[in-house]
Every structure is written in structure tokens, then in C-alpha cells.
Image: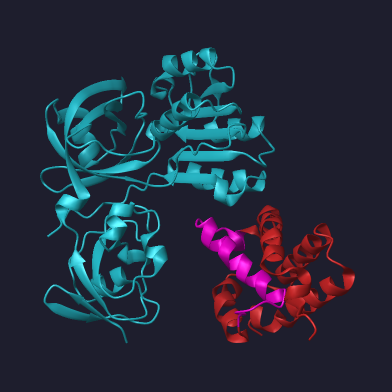
Chain colours: A red, B cyan
Amino acid sequence: MSETLYQRLGGEAAVNAAVDIFYRKVLADRQIRDFFDDVDMDAQRAKQKSFLTMVFGGPKTYTGKDMREAHKKLVANGLNESHFNAVAGHLQATLDELKVPKALSAEVMAIAASTHDDVLNR
Amino acid sequence: MPRLQYGSASYDLLSGESVLDALLRQGVDLSYSCRKGSCLTCMLRCAKGHIPPQAQDGLRDSLRAQGYFLPCLASPEGDIDLLSGEDADLFGRARLVEIERLAPAIVRIRLEAATPLYYHPGQFINLRRGDGLMRSYSLASVPRREDHLEIHVKRLKGGAMSTWLNDEARVGDAIDIQGANGSGFYLPGHPDRPILLIGNGSGLAPLYGIARDALGDGHRGEIRLYHGSRTADGLYLRDELRALAVSHENFFYTPCVSGPEPNPGDRTGRADTAAFDDLPQLSGWRVFLCGSPPMVHAAKRTAYLAGAKLADIHADAFELRELRKTPRA
């Protein structure tokens, strides 16, 4: 049986390696960091980990409905296409930094792209 | 739907709801404060049923074994029978043995516990006055060096406990203590890892304990302490900290004054600003932050962006929210 994307990426260890890099990039980006400016950084990091687990093709993934609900307030506060693209850019940069092979990172980015309408509540 | 049995009544628990929220929603009078597992004010005991393990994180083994858990963190799947905490399990008796003014608005209080308390410097205790008034204070003392528990109390406008301790309490007064609680303390085992301590006001208390604990344990990595105050006279324990810096070549003390008229040698500006100017790169560092919430929250983010791991950043923001006065039943 062939391995899942999650297994090929390295499973939870890979997510753990990615989450700090990714979360730092997002927090350092002035254009989007206000959306991530939660006082409870540990809770926020846990959310980033769930998100990365999902785009890595891992278990216990969000449904489209969850993604919609989770971003509803942010969209009301102005979350738009440019923010979505900025986060996607940080995800790509994170994968590059971890030297994830192009074929695999393309699969991750495809899953991330598939959340577009739900995230932006279109 | 799971049921909660408490006293002579039974309550329901909605999906995803915490035991604390369920009981409060149904009108039960419970003591609570932070609602996120830090203050331990709402502790209850589970007599029957399964408590999720994370609702016992950070509790002493003896309390855990007796079924104590944090209702604010527990969303059990099945029925639970609850008991209120036994006062004798949670609170010990103590006496004020020394009250010393360290700064115009800060006193050092030394307490003698009737039963010796096991603690790490940097942890906190809850203090309960005879009338039930309760507040949390961090421990500045180091058990192997000092017999008494030491806390630093800053007088806050309208603060009932802090005003009492600053202006009215007398040596010999009795007080109840609960603790020690919290995970922000020095852990031996990595003697070469650098440590950054940033505090403002009486947020120095746990940092003073942690620094001396680490040095006493033979820590070899650098330990950098930044203490901030708006006024120069708020920088208490200056001489002690200078002396510590002289006697330990890996300990560095930077007093910072953010208002006008600093003393010669003080840095101007906030303690966190000074620290991050000096140390732009923090990967591998352990970071302890204590004091006002805006400073602590901002510094936590800055430390993280500077490369410290979230698990290595201990942030203790003084939440000035009123603790419920209701004594336990």
C-alpha cells in the first residue's frame, strides 16, 4: 500500500518542525499579523498546528464548515484575498526552508488552495 | 448528556462545556478566577467518574491522588460525582514574620508556614485573609537559602489585599496559604543554557528567586535580568542585584527607568525594550517574563519572534481581576 502524503512528509514530527517556522513568519508579517494577534499564543500555536496537519494531509482534519466558522469573524474584520495569499506565501516559504521536495510541497499547496472559498466565506 | 452530581443536586453538562462553566451557568456559587488553569482557585474533587488528564496538569501528586482537578479545564465525556475541596488539603496556616519596605509602593513580606511548603522559587501561592479575601503572589525566596517564604507586594489603587499588606498588616498576623503553583521556575539539567529574565514593578519577585536558584544550582550559562520601573525609586533590591552581578560573572543586571530622572547607570526606557535591543537573537534561551500584562504579552511575542521556543517562554502576567471572595464551603 502506498504511503499517504502525511506519512511521506514525515508525519507529526514534520508538522512540529514546520509550525514554529510558519507561526513566526505569520506573526512577523505586518500586513497580516493583526489577524493573529491573540494574547493566548499557546492556543494560537495549537490552531496553526491543526491547520498544518490538515494541509499536510494528516488525520483529524478540519471540515469545510469548520474553516468557514473559524474565519467568519476575521472576514467580517476585513480578511481578504491578499491576506490569504500572504499566508499561502509563508506556507510555501516554510516548506522551502524545510527542504520539502517540490512534488510534495505542490500537494500541500494544492490542499491549502482548496480551502480558499471556505476561509474567505465565499 | 453527562450529568454532574454536586452536593445534593444534579447538573447537566453541555457538549464542549467545562465543569466550571456548567456549574456557574446553573447557579452554583463557586470560587474561581482565571478560568484557564493558572490560578487553581476553582479546584474541586472528583469522587466518581473519569476526569480528562489535562485537567490535573500541574497539580501536586498528593492532590491528584485525592481526585483534585481543575473544573475550568475539564470537559468530561461521562458522568462525574463532585466534592468540594477540603480546606485542610488546600490551605495551610502561616504567619507574617517580617514586613520591610523596599520601595515607596512595594513591601517585602516574609511568611512562616506552619507546615513546610515544598516549592520552587518563581512559583506562586494564594494568600487568603481571615475574611476570605484571596490573591496570588510569586515566591522570591529560595528554600535552600531561606527559611521563610518571601513575597513582594505592590500597593495597587483600590487593591484590598495589597493595601492591607502595605499599610495595615502587622508582624504576627495569621494568613492562610495555598500552593505552591505554577511551572515558571528554574529546572536544573541544562546548566549552560542562557536565561533571560524580564520584569517590571514587583514582577521582580519570581525573577529574583529564579536567578538566585539558578546561580545556587551552579548554572554556568549567562543569566540576564532586566528590571523596569517608571521611576528610579521603584527599582528595589538594586544593591543585592549589583552584588550578585559582582560575585557571579555569568549574572548581568540591568535596571531600566522608563520615566524621567533615572539614576546614573540606569538604562532609560522599558525593560523589555532594553533586553531585546541587547539580545536580538534568542534561539536556545529560556525566557521568564513577569509583571504588567501589556509588557508580558508584548515581550512574549517579541521573544518568540526572536527565536525562543514557546515552551521555553514562561509568561506570568499580573491579572488584576478580582478574585472571588467567597470562601470555600
Residue A116: % across, % down: 71, 80
Whether residue B11 is visible, yes or no, is: yes
Q: Position of residue A121 (x, y in %)?
A: 63, 82
Give how far across and how far down residue B170 sits, in percent.
13, 26
B254 to B182, vertically: above or below: above
The quarter of the image holding the C terminus of chain A is: bottom right
Answer above or below: position of B233 versus B318.
above
Left or right: residue B34 compared with residue B256: left
Q: Is A8 left or right of A43, judged from the image as shown?
A: right
Q: Residue at x 74, y 69 (%)?
A: A82
Above or below for B310 versus B262: below
Quarter of the image with the N terminus of chain A is bottom right
Between A29 and B307, the one nearer to me in the picture: B307
- Decide if residue B252 is on the left or right side of residue B158: right
Q: Main secondary structure of the magenta part?
A: helix
Q: Answer yes or no: is residue B264 visible.
A: no
> Residue B116 or B194: which is nearer the viewer?
B116
Q: Nearer the viewer, residue B251 or B30?
A: B251
- What's drawn in magenta, residue-wise? A34-62
Q: What residue sits 52% from the left and 13% below the top?
A: B247
Q: Which residue is at 17% across, 47% downward?
A: B133
Specify the quadrant of the image occupied by residue A31: bottom right
Which residue ends up furthest to the right in the rendered image? Answer: A102
Residue A32 forms part of the magenta stretch:
no
Q: Position of residue B75 (x, y in %)?
A: 37, 73
Is residue B42 shown left or right of residue B205?
left
